[in-house]
Image (cartoon, rainbow, N blue to C red):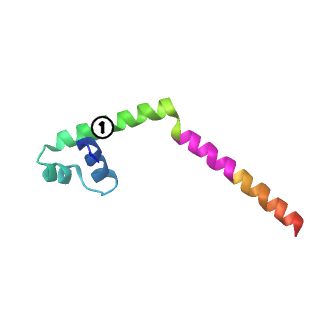
Amino acid sequence: MIITKQKEYFIDYYFNNLTLQEIADNNKVSRNAVHKNIKDILQKLDYYEEKLNLYSNKKKIEDLIKDIDIDIKRKIEELI
């Protein structure tokens, strides 16, 4: 799998908790270059979320599952 520099920087920054300077040093680029790439990918993620509504849909699904769980618990309690 090919990992782009933006994705690598994003993973290092958000999941591996590296600082911008640590990422820059590891990749032999400037801190500003790392910052710009992370900023660009965040803008892309915001754009796609705005268009696809993945996060809000996930929340709706979780709420529906919660309601179903409550209904199932009630039915089980009625049977007992």
Residue at image position (18%, 39%) is 33
Q: Position of residue 75 (x, y in %)?
A: 84, 60
The residue positioned farthest toward the left in the image shown:
28
Q: Position of residue 21 (x, y in %)?
A: 18, 51
Residue at image position (63%, 45%) is 61
Q: Position of residue 23 (x, y in %)?
A: 20, 51
Type of amino acid under label 1: Lys
In front of the other: 79 or 46: 79
Whether the magenta-drawn stretch holds residue 49 is answered as: no
Magenta residues span 55-65
In front of the other: 1 or 9: 1
Residue 4 position (above or below residue 18): above
Whether the magenta-drawn stretch holds residue 60 is answered as: yes
The residue positioned farthest toward the bottom in the image shown:
80
- Count how many numbered circles sit on residues in the image: 1
Residue 4 position (above or below residue 13): above
Task: Check the picture and name the quadrant holding the C terminus.
Answer: bottom right
Kind of element beneath mark 1 = helix
**Can you identify the residue that label 1 sits on?**
39
In terms of image quadrants, where is residue 6?
Answer: top left
Left or right? Give the position of 37 relative to 24.
right
Residue at image position (15%, 49%) is 27
Left or right? Give the position of 52 relative to 7.
right
The residue positioned farthest toward the front in the image shown:
1
Residue at image position (13%, 43%) is 30
Q: Position of residue 62 (x, y in %)?
A: 62, 49
- How crowded pointer 1 is (Cα within 10 Å; few <14, some 14-19, many 20+) is rated as some
The secondary structure that most of the magenta stretch takes on is helix
